[in-house]
Image (tube, rainbow, N blue to C red):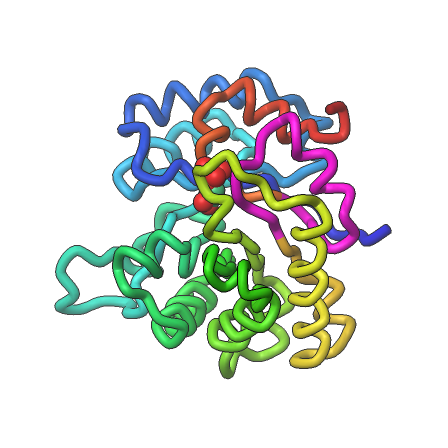
Amino acid sequence: MSDRIPLMAGNWKMNLNHLEAIAHVQKLAFALADKDYEAVEVAVLPPFTDLRSVQTLVDGDKLKIKYGAQDVSAHDSGAYTGEISGPMLAKLKCAFAVVGHSERRQYHDETDELCNAKVKAAFRNDLTPILCVGEGLDVRKAGNQVAHTLAQVDGGLKDVPAEQAKTIVIAYEPVWAIGTGEVATPEDAQEVCGAIRGRLAELYGQEVADKVRIQYGGSVKSGNVAAIMAQPDVDGALIGGASLDADEFVKIVRFRDQ
Ligand SMILES: O=C(CO)COP(=O)(O)O
């Protein structure tokens, strides 16, 4: 048994405006009890425009739920129209910043080099990066999922010191399993998550590798989360669609009861 505390994070993607966000977090707060937060770290990752409302609610009611952003600029300030900086997110007391989600890699051409700069920007601003990695269907069919994913881990962590690396969260999200209802089998998830931990051990030593939380993401639901979480190198889940349903998300948080 590892002493890594599972991280269940809801990636809302481009869903829920700030009023809906308040209602949703209130529902979660009402349903979740102290014992849930003791067993699992619970986080929501709303769109940028919701973050201030979520912060006000969490601060005002001293909620234990954490929150973060779905992206962060590689730059801390300046002429970067449309970007949101690490200092801005830190000022809103975000705990996390997602980096390199496959939808950003795919639709915004984000490279490993840019993801690396974003990981560093997150660390520079005391945000925990959730670095997303994972292969597409072609790569999976060719059996190259491990090599492909490890190259993304190498790229994202380039020149990141061990002191920082030990606090990163890595999310393995096979692209073919995202929003498709097609879940990787628990064995598929373990194969790649185990390989990621092995690579972290090569890069930073076993002690660091044992501290890093590795999430699985891709069509996670209350019905499949327990089997995935039973894998030794899976330390949480990054949940898209199912995180928009408060009851379902709470069930996922309580994966041990499923
Ligand atoms: O991309 C994901 C989370 O970041 C997964 O999305 P789904 O849970 O909707 O498949």
Is 70 placed left or right of 181 in the picture?
Answer: left
Q: Is residue 2 magenta?
A: no
Question: Where, by quadrant of the figure, is residue 257 drawn?
Answer: top right
**As drawn, which residue projects farthest toward the right?**
1
Q: Nearest the camera: 106 or 62?
A: 106
Residue 213: tell me if it is visible: yes
Residue in the picture at 61% in, 63% down: 167
Up the image or down, 174 lies above or below 19; here it is: below
Q: Residue furthest bottom?
A: 159
Q: Residue at x 64, y 30 (%)?
A: 253
**Residue 227 belongs to the span the image colors magenta:** yes
Q: Seen in the image, is 118 located left or right of residue 165? A: left
From the viewer's side, name the closer residue of 138 and 162.
138
Residue at image location 54% in from the left, 34% down from the top: 65
The image quarter containing residue 42 is top right
124 shown above or below 9:
below
Provide residue 153's location: percent of width, then percent of height: 54, 70
Is 131 drawn above or below residue 20 in the view shown?
below
Image quadrant where one finds the C terminus = top right
Q: Is residue 215 above or below residue 161?
A: above
Q: Is residue 214 or residue 148 the one in the foreground?
A: 148
Query: What residue lies at 61% left-to-right and 45% top-to-bottom?
Result: 184
- The picture places residue 216, in percent across and down from the top left corner, at 60, 48
Q: Which residues are magenta?
A: 215-236
Could you tell me if residue 10 is visible in this image? no
Q: Position of residue 139 (x, y in %)?
A: 50, 64
